[in-house]
Image (spheres, rainbow, N blue to C red):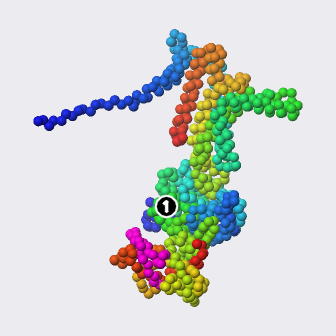
Amino acid sequence: MSDAIAIRAPMAKVSLGKFWIVPPAALLALLFFYPLALIARQAFLDDSGVANAAEIIRVLHSRFFLNALINTVTISVSATAGCLIVGLVLALILAFVPFPGSGFIARLIDTFMALPTFLVTLAFTFLYGSAGMLNAGLMETFSLPLPPVDFLYSTWGVVLAEVTVYTPFILRPLLAAFSLVDRGQIEAASVLGARPFRIVRQVILPAAIPALIAGGSLCLLLTVNEFGIVLFIGAKGVITLPLLIYGKAIQESAYQIACIIAVINIALSLGLFGLYRFAAGRLGA
Amino acid sequence: MSAAAFTGASVMDIDAAKIRGVGSNVHFDKVSVAYGAHVVLHPLTLDIAPGEILAMIGPSGSGKTTALRAVAGFVRPASGRIRIGATDVTDLPPYERGLGMVVQNYALFPHMRVEDNVAFGLRAQGADKALIGERVKDALATVGMATFARRYPRELSGGQQQRVAIARALAVRPRVLLLDEPLSALDAQIRRNMVEEIARLHRSLPGLTILYVTHDQTEALTLADKIAIMRDGRVCSHGPTTELYRRPPNRFTAEFLGRANLLPVTIAEGVGSKGFATARHGDVILTSAGRDEKAGDKSLLCIRPQHLSLTADSEHTNRIVGTLREVHWQGELTHLVLDVDGTPVRVSATKLPMALPEPGVKVPLYFAPADTSLLPEDAGV
């Protein structure tokens, strides 16, 4: 009798694991990348599918585009700088100068992140608008014929509103970073003769640089793409890229121009994001 | 290669003379600290002489770190004054007190190189560049870290980081050096080495006044000229290290500073001209060094485990008998636990008879009167 044992070759197992990625990837492609591709196609090709470089160059050299670009950069850089300064000062106070209710105030500032951006703008209109509380009070007190404060309907009104809305985006990561700063380092620095300003500059801030970069980059991205605040304030002549896209697409039905500007806006955002990732990688954020 | 490598001397000996500062005395004048209604430090009056190492030891929450932080300026006394030298520093901010401080977790600045960490205090005090370079070099040489000047703290071991922290504190030539459990984060072997290094460092810097807070009695016994034992926010004993160890004034001190066997006794004959008293423990008469005990007083006879012997000689004239309960061999030492009339008695012996008695056997123990002390039965219990 043969002792041979039939050895069955193991069946190749079909792993289904890698296919789980297909449905979400398809959904993402359908809902996100396909519309993006349509915008890019509309921007770079004319109706007959031929590359349309002349129109792109015309838009890039147009006054309305350059004004919008300058406004966008001015507002976003100013607002981000403002957010960094206000956020840093607030975070330092909340983290290192404890006072009764500091925790409540930190949480209250946090709630700003949950509110729609136009709400702050609306509140600003009530406070600083032509018929707002400040102007009404000043006009009544000093018998003025016209509202003396009219910065709200300018670039700086938009900047102030954006600083108010986006400061929590700096404050939150800074508070998290400050909570990790070893109090022993601060005390050691103080005993060694360092005054508070030196301690902030040489001990606390270096520990907070990754958080500052992360928060600042996020702020810059959000302010570059901010639409609601600029639209709601309705400042004369303050047209940013998102507002220009809206105006060209919805009000003028100039879809190709809108798409060209949209592509530039996307490139700007992705460039900023790339810069953030590079800086964060270098500094360990 | 450092000079220490050639001489075999401690690295901390090198160039230490260059860092000699003029130490100041520290005076606590009825200093108390409270958080709201909770008093964490009861009025404390204490002096640390110039050049002295005072170790404050005690269990957690005893107030020792609070006292140190009050000297540093991080805790504001509810009452009392603190003087360093002739200066009343009670109302001064920490950066104006002229101190150095080393804490448990080193607290080095992680983004600065070792040399910048050491230079930090000098830069903060506005020293000129040449002086900073010289002092940094000297301080790093003193702690044997001169070759690590360009490293970042993350590239150093715990022991090396602690040396840098000490160099950083020494570089500013502090009037007083505050050490807050500086060795607690190190493992046992490195801790032992660092205790010896700090002892050598202080011998090289005899003028430096040090307030050393620890919960480790070995560190305190090795380093301190004087010890203050803290309990519940109060100093329960204070005195020269050897005196406090040999003649503890109360039960808490006896048991906190090393191990102590405390036998309840009744004084039979008060302290005589030679400083010895006779005491009765059950039916046994014992002779002990005493203070001012009188016949009939209830006392505790304190004898350290290493002073008990299993063999009699001309010095070990006191004899008690106990029942052996446990034997723990630990290489260099063997620990025996005996029951002497219901009181557990520990013996630490380096040399034992070849044939160790079995647990349950009655064993005689001998000790010298000079190695004992008497404590009031109710003091510090």
User: Residue furthest toward the bottom?
Assistant: B273
Q: Position of residue A6 (x, y in %)?
A: 19, 33
- Quarter containing the N terminus of chain B: bottom left
Q: Position of residue B334 (x, y in %)?
A: 40, 72
Near-viewer residue (B307 or B186): B307
Name the residue at 55% across, 19% down.
A39
Quarter-wise, where is residue A5 in the image? top left
Q: Secondary structure at mark 1?
A: loop
- Quarter containing the C terminus of chain B: bottom right
Q: Chain of mark 1?
A: B
On screen, residue A78 above or below B85:
above
Q: Position of residue B272 (x, y in %)?
A: 57, 89
Q: Is residue B316 magenta?
A: no
Quarter-wise, where is residue B63 in the image? bottom right
Near-viewer residue (B65 or A158): B65
Q: Which residues are magenta?
A: B318-343
Classified by dominant secondary structure, the portion drawn in magenta counts as strand
Crowding at mark 1 (Cα within 10 Å: few <14, some 14-19, many 20+): many
| Residue receiving disc 1 | B144
Near-viewer residue (A229 or B277): B277
Name the residue at 57% across, 67% down.
B57
Is B184 displayed left or right of B331 in the figure?
Answer: right
Name the residue at 61% across, 31% down.
A222
